[in-house]
Image (cartoon, coloured by chain):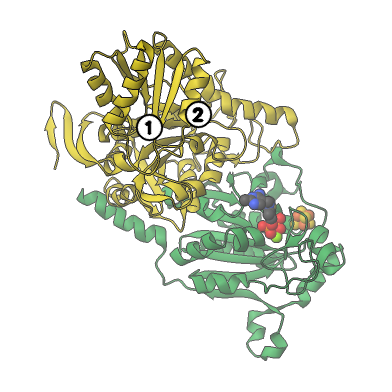
Chain colours: A yellow, B green
C-alpha cells in the first residue's frame, strides 16, 4: 500500500491508523483497550499490527482494566498504550492518577467526541481538554498533545512516547473524531528508531530518588534485579509509604507537578504563520486549526493583518511563548469545539493586555473557514470604526 | 528474625501495619514458604490490592506493585502479558476481589490467564473500619448493616470455578501448612489459580460481627465452620449447611492457558511478517 520515496514511506492512512503506526514505530509493544466510537479503529489496528512485531494486544473487560493493564505492562518492561473516547476516558481517570503518582510512562489516546455522558458518539468535540489536565483527583501534572491532521496524529503520537519515557508521566494524545476518521497522506520516515527506555543504575538504586531537575533517571522494570516497591500511596525515595510523613508527601506532590511545569519551556510545540505584522491572531489547536489557517489566508487576501498559531502541545499550557508570539497583536481569537475552555487559559496568559475572543462551537460540527473569517473581519472592523 | 524472614522480608518496609492477632501475618508466612519451596524469587511479580490484605506483598522483598482498590488483576494481567515467564501473584481482600474488583476477577478466570489470586476472606472491609463486605454472612451486623446484612454472601470458590479458573482451593489460617502447600500448587499451576483463605480479623470482623476480638476464639469459629472437601462427600445437605469446604476444590490441567496460547499466535504472526 505504501511507496518508498527519499527514505520515507508515504501511506494513505486514517488518523486512527496513523496513531497505531507511530506507536509501533516508537516501540510500543502492549496495548489494552475496549471498543468505543470514534476510537475503535485504534484498537482494531493494534490487534492486527502488534502481534506482527511481537507485541501484545488485549481487549479487556472495561476501560478501567485497560489502563491498569497498560500500567502493569509498562512496569513489566514494555512501552504501552491505551485508547478510548468520552465515557471510556472518564473510567480511566483513577488509573491516570495512579500512573502519575508512580511515574509510569504510558500513552493515553483520547479520540475526542462531544458532550457529557454518552454525548455524541460519532461527532467531534474538544470537551475533554480540561479533563486531560484535571480529570483525576489530587494534584498532578500530565502532558497533552493535539494533532490536527493524520500526519500530526503520526508525528505527535511518536513524540508522546518520547515524552512519556523522558518525563515518566502519562501523556495524552488528544485527537478527535475528525482527525481519527479522516484519511490522508502520511509520510513515515524510514529510519525512525524506537524510543529508548533508559535503565537506572543498580548501584545505590532508589526507585524514587529524583535528579536535581525533578526527573527520575530512567525506568526500572520488574524482574530486572531491582526488587521494586511501586506504591500509589505517597511514598519516600525508597518507595515506602509515607502518608504519615507530611514533609515527604509535600515534597513528592510538588515534584510530581513541577517536573512538568518547570520544563514548560522545553515542552513548547507551536506552529505559526503570518505573525510578523499580525494584529489579529487565531490561536488554534486540533481540528479547528485547519479552517483557522484557511480563514487567516482568506482574511490576508482581503488585506486584513491576520495571523495563525497552532498549539500542538496544549498541556503544559505554553504561556510564556504565547505571550511572546502574540506581543504585537491586538486581538486573539480562540476557536474551540467546547463551551470555551482554552480561551480562559489564553486570557490568563496575556493578563488583560489584549482583547481575547472565544469562538466556541458545540453540537458536533467543525467551524467552517467562513465562520472564523467572519470573526476576524468583525474584529478588524471593530478596530477601524 | 527467622532465617526465612531474614531472607524474604523487605526490611525497610517494616514494621507490619496489621493489628495484633491478624491473620494476614499467617498468610504472609505461608506465601514466603511456598516461594522458598518453589525457588522462584527472581521470577516473581507481586501485586497487592487496597485493603489490609493488599499489604502482604509489600513486605516481600521481590518486585511489588501496590495498586488501586479492586484493580490488582488487570495490573497483574499487564505484568504477565509483558513477560509470560513471570510468576504473578495477586493479594486481594474479599471486598477488593469480589466487590469493586468482581468484574476483573470473573474475566481473569474466564481467560484462564496464568495468575495466582490469593483472596483474603475476613468477612469484612477491614481497612476502612468494619463495613459490610460481599462475603459478610446474611443477618450479620456491621457498621453499614446495623439492622443485619440483608444480602447473601458470595462463594468465591464457586464463582471462580464457574468463571473458568482452573485451580481452586480454600484453606484457613488455622491450617498454615496446608495453606502454604496450596499456594505453592497454585503458583505452579499453569492457568488462573485461586486460593481463598478464611481468616480472622479480630479488630473489625471479630468485634463487629462475632462479638470477640480474641484471635484464638475466632480461629476456633473458623475451624468449626469448615469441613474438608473429602469428608463432605458423604454428608447430607443439612449437615453441610453453612459450612465452607476446604481443600483443593478444582484442578483442571487440560484447558489452554491464555498467555501461552496467545503468545503462540504472536510468534506465528511475527514470523510471517
Ligand atoms: C476506589 C476506592 N474506593 C474505596 C476505597 C476505600 N477502601 C480502602 S480499603 C477498602 C476495603 C477493603 O476491604 P477488603 O478488600 O475486604 O480488604 P481488607 O481490609 O478487609 O483486607 C476500601 C473500601 C479506595 N481506596 N478506593
Ligand atoms: S483491621 Fe482486621 S484485617 Fe485489618 S489489620 Fe486489623 S485485624 Fe487485620
Ligand atoms: Mg476484607
Which residue lies under the disc numbered 1? A146
Asked if residue A182 is positioned above or below residue B216 in the image, the reply reads above
Rounded to the nearest whole Å, what is the CA distance between mark 1 and mark 2? 31 Å
Nearer to us of marks 1 and 2 is 1
Element carrying mark 2? loop
Identity of the residue drawn at 45% across and 17% down? A355
Image location of residue B273, percent across then percent down: 21, 48
The tag on residue A200 is 2
Q: Nearer the viewer, residue B62 or A298?
A: A298
Judge left or right: residue A317 versus residue A3. Answer: right
**B260 horizontally vs B47: left or right:** left
x, y percentage for residue B151? 69, 72
Q: In the image shown, does A55 or A134 lie closer to the viewer? A: A134
Q: Is residue A371 left or right of residue B2?
A: left
Residue A65 position within the rendered picture, expressed as x and y whole percent measured from the top left: 49, 53
In the rendered image, is residue B112 in sight? yes
Query: Can you say whether A306 is above or below A188 in the image?
Result: above
The mark nearer the N terminus, 1 or 2, is 1
**Is residue B86 something one can see in this rendering?**
no
Amino acid at each position: 500500500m505504501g511507496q518508498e520515496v527519499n527514505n520515507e514511506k508515504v501511506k494513505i492512512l486514517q488518523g486512527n491508523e496513523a496513531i497505531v503506526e507511530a506507536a509501533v514505530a516508537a516501540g510500543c509493544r502492549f496495548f489494552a483497550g475496549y471498543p468505543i466510537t470514534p476510537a475503535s479503529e485504534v484498537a482494531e489496528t493494534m490487534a492486527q499490527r502488534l502481534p506482527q512485531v511481537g507485541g501484545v494486544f488485549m481487549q479487556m473487560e472495561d476501560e478501567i482494566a485497560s489502563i491498569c493493564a497498560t500500567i502493569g505492562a509498562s512496569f513489566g518492561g514494555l512501552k504501552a498504550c491505551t485508547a478510548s473516547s468520552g465515557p471510556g476516558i472518564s473510567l480511566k481517570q483513577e488509573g491516570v492518577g495512579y500512573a502519575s503518582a508512580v511515574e509510569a510512562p504510558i500513552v493515553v489516546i483520547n479520540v475526542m467526541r462531544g458532550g457529557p455522558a454518552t454525548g455524541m458518539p460519532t461527532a467531534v468535540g474538544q470537551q475533554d481538554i480540561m479533563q486531560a489536565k484535571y480529570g483525576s483527583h489530587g494534584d498532578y501534572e500530565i502532558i497533552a498533545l493535539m494533532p490536527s491532521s493524520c500526519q500530526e496524529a503520526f508525528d505527535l503520537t511518536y513524540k508522546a512516547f518520547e515524552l512519556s519515557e523522558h518525563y515518566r508521566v502519562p501523556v495524552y494524545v488528544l485527537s478527535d473524531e475528525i482527525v481519527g476518521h479522516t484519511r490522508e497522506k502520511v509520510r513515515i520516515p524510514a529510519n525512525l528508531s524506537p524510543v529508548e527506555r533508559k535503565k537506572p543504575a543498580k548501584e545505590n538504586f532508589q526507585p524514587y530518588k529524583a535528579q536535581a531537575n525533578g526527573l527520575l533517571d530512567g525506568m526500572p522494570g520488574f524482574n530486572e534485579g531491582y526488587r521494586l516497591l511501586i506504591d500509589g500511596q505517597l511514598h519516600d525515595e525508597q518507595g515506602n509509604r509515607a502518608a504519615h510523613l507530611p514533609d515527604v508527601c509535600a515534597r513528592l506532590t510538588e515534584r510530581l507537578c513541577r517536573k512538568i511545569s518547570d520544563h514548560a519551556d522545553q515542552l513548547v510545540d507551536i506552529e505559526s504563520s503570518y505573525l510578523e505584522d499580525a494584529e489579529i491572531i487565531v490561536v488554534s489547536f486540533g481540528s479547528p486549526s485547519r479552517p483557522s489557517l484557511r480563514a487567516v489566508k482568506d482574511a490576508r487576501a482581503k488585506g486584513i493583518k491576520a495571523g495563525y498559531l497552532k498549539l500542538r502541545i496544549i498541556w503544559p499550557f505554553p504561556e510564556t511563548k504565547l505571550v511572546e508570539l502574540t506581543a504585537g497583536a491586538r486581538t486573539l481569537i480562540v476557536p474551540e469545539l467546547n463551551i470555551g475552555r482554552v480561551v480562559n487559559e489564553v486570557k490568563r496568559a496575556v493578563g488583560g493586555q489584549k482583547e481575547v475572543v472565544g469562538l466556541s462551537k458545540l453540537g458536533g460540527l467543525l467551524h467552517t473557514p467562513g465562520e472564523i473569517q467572519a470573526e476576524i473581519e468583525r474584529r478588524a472592523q471593530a478596530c477601524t470604526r | 528474625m527467622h532465617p526465612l524472614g531474614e531472607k524474604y522480608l523487605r526490611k525497610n518496609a517494616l514494621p507490619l501495619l496489621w493489628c495484633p492477632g491478624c491473620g494476614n501475618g499467617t498468610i504472609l508466612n505461608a506465601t514466603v514458604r511456598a516461594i522458598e519451596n518453589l525457588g522462584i524469587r527472581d521470577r516473581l511479580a507481586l501485586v497487592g490490592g487496597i485493603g489490609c490484605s493488599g499489604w502482604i506483598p509489600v513486605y516481600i522483598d521481590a518486585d511489588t506493585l501496590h495498586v488501586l482498590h479492586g484493580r490488582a488483576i488487570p495490573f497483574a494481567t499487564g505484568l504477565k502479558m509483558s513477560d509470560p515467564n513471570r510468576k504473578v501473584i495477586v493479594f486481594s481482600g474479599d471486598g477488593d476481589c469480589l466487590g469493586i474488583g468482581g468484574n476483573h476477577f470473573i474475566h481473569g478466570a474466564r481467560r484462564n490467564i496464568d495468575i495466582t489470586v490469593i483472596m483474603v476472606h475476613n468477612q469484612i472491609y477491614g481497612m476502612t473500619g468494619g463495613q459490610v463486605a460481599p462475603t459478610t454472612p446474611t443477618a450479620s451486623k456491621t457498621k453499614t448493616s446495623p439492622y443485619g446484612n440483608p444480602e447473601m454472601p458470595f462463594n468465591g470458590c464457586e464463582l471462580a470455578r464457574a468463571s473458568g479458573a482452573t485451580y481452586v482451593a480454600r484453606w484457613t489460617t488455622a491450617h498454615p501448612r496446608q495453606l502454604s502447600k496450596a499456594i505453592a500448587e497454585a503458583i505452579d499451576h499453569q492457568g488462573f489459580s485461586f486460593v481463598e483463605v478464611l481468616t480472622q480479623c479480630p479488630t473489625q470482623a471479630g468485634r463487629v460481627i462475632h462479638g470477640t476480638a480474641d484471635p484464638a476464639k475466632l480461629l476456633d469459629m473458623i475451624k468449626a465452620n469448615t469441613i474438608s472437601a473429602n469428608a463432605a462427600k458423604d454428608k447430607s445437605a443439612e449437615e453441610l449447611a453453612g459450612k465452607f469446604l476446604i481443600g483443593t476444590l478444582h484442578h483442571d490441567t487440560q484447558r489452554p492457558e491464555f498467555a501461552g496460547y496467545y503468545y503462540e499466535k504472536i510468534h506465528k504472526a511475527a514470523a510471517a511478517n
